[in-house]
Image (spheres, helix red, strand yellow):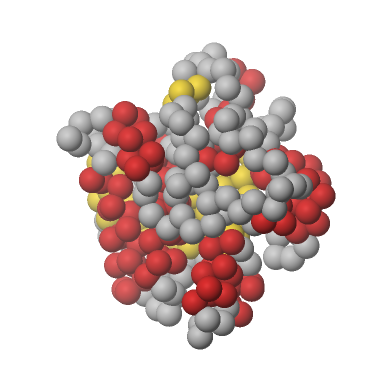
């Protein structure tokens, strides 16, 4: 979901802090690398993100986070690493900066001990990012829990672009009010209550099944190609439909949105 918060008066949620913690299913590690179809299914379908928030009123999505979390348009956002091999750092840098072709934001990667807006760690097991300018107030604002020197280039791209989408202020596309996903709610509960997530029902409702409010926000058209869309497994829908299983790069819809969200690149 790509959002542009229009209501400045959301006082009750001004103190909310929202993060997304993206956990990768351990099944990924078991992917059969000799079978491309199996590998792709394991890699792209078993991906989940936990949204963490201090806000307990109503569905918790990025859309009802505190105020507008956009960086000033045209600004340079400083990014700092803690840990990570030179190769892993190079891949994160490469794919983070892929947003710069469309969003009028520059990510400047600074020395490990320098002041920074976005602070990246590499602590297993999950990956996460705070939304937009929330990053300023965190000692670690983004984490890549499963990256190492053996990570595939596709996974570096998929995960880095997704997390830096959050860092730009973008939310999850499946929470778009027009997504109309025919959730098989029991299957969703069964899956997320098990490992590696081990979520309770309330957390699943909040993080997976919530639909963002239509009023008060700007949306472009619901985009199943968006890099910000969870992969939705067939067993999670009542009509056995797979949604967005292989989104690994910035979509045309993402491009169109960030060009309006951070205008001026072209
Ligand atoms: Zn996410």
Residue at the (63%, 35%) spot, across then down: 180
Q: In the orientation shown, which residue stands out farthest toward the bottom?
A: 34
Residue at the (38%, 41%) spot, across then down: 254
Q: In the rendered image, which quarter is residue 220 located in?
A: top left
Location of residue 259 in the rendering, given as x and y in whole percent from the top left corner: 29, 34
Q: Can the viewer see residue 9?
A: yes
| Residue in front for this viewpoint, 187 or 66 | 187
Location of residue 246 in the rendering, given as x and y in whole percent from the top left corner: 49, 59
Q: In the orientation shown, which residue stands out farthest toward the left?
A: 266
Residue 7 sits above or below residue 202 on the image: above
Residue at the (64%, 73%) spot, across then down: 27
Locate residue 81 relative to residue 10 in the image: left or right. left
Count of marks overlaid on the render: 0
Q: In the orientation shown, which residue stands out farthest toward the front?
A: 239
Locate residue 251 relative to residue 237 in the image: left or right. left
Residue at the (58%, 50%) spot, across then down: 243
Q: Can the viewer see residue 119?
A: no
Q: In the rendered image, which quarter is residue 81 located in?
A: bottom left
Location of residue 92 in the rendering, given as x and y in whole percent from the top left corner: 35, 62
Residue 129 sits above or below residue 35 on the image: above
Locate residue 99 relative to residue 69 in the image: left or right. left
Report the quarter where the C terminus lies: top left
Q: In the orientation shown, which residue stands out farthest toward the top?
A: 9
Location of residue 241 in the rendering, given as x and y in whole percent from the top left corner: 64, 51
């Amino acid at each position: 979901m790509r959002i542009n918060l229009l209501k400045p008066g959301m006082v009750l949620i001004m103190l909310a802090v929202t993060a997304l913690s993206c956990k990768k299913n351990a099944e990924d590690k078991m992917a059969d690398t000799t079978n491309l179809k199996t590998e792709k299914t394991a890699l792209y379908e078993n991906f989940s993100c936990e949204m963490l928030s201090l806000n307990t009123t109503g569905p918790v999505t990025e859309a009802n986070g505190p105020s507008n979390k956009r960086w000033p348009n045209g600004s340079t956002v400083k990014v700092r690493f803690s840990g990570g091999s030179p190769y892993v750092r190079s891949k994160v840098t490469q794919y983070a900066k892929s947003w710069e072709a469309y969003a009028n934001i520059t990510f400047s990667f600074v020395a490990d001990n320098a002041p920074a807006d976005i602070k990246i760690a590499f602590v297993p097991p999950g990956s996460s990012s705070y939304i937009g300018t929330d990053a300023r107030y965190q000692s670690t604002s983004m984490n890549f829990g499963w990256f190492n020197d053996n990570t595939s280039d596709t996974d570096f791209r998929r995960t880095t672009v997704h997390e830096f989408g959050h860092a730009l202020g973008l939310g999850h596309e499946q929470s778009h009010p027009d997504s109309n996903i025919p959730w098989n709610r029991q299957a969703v509960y069964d899956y997320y209550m098990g490992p590696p997530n081990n979520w309770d029902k309330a957390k699943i409702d909040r993080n997976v099944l919530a639909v963002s409010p239509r009023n008060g926000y700007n949306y472009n058209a619901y985009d199943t190609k968006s890099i910000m869309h969870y992969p939705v497994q067939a067993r999670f829908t009542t009509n056995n439909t797979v949604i967005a299983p292989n989104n690994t790069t910035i979509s045309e819809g993402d491009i169109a949105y960030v060009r309006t969200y951070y205008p001026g690149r072209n």
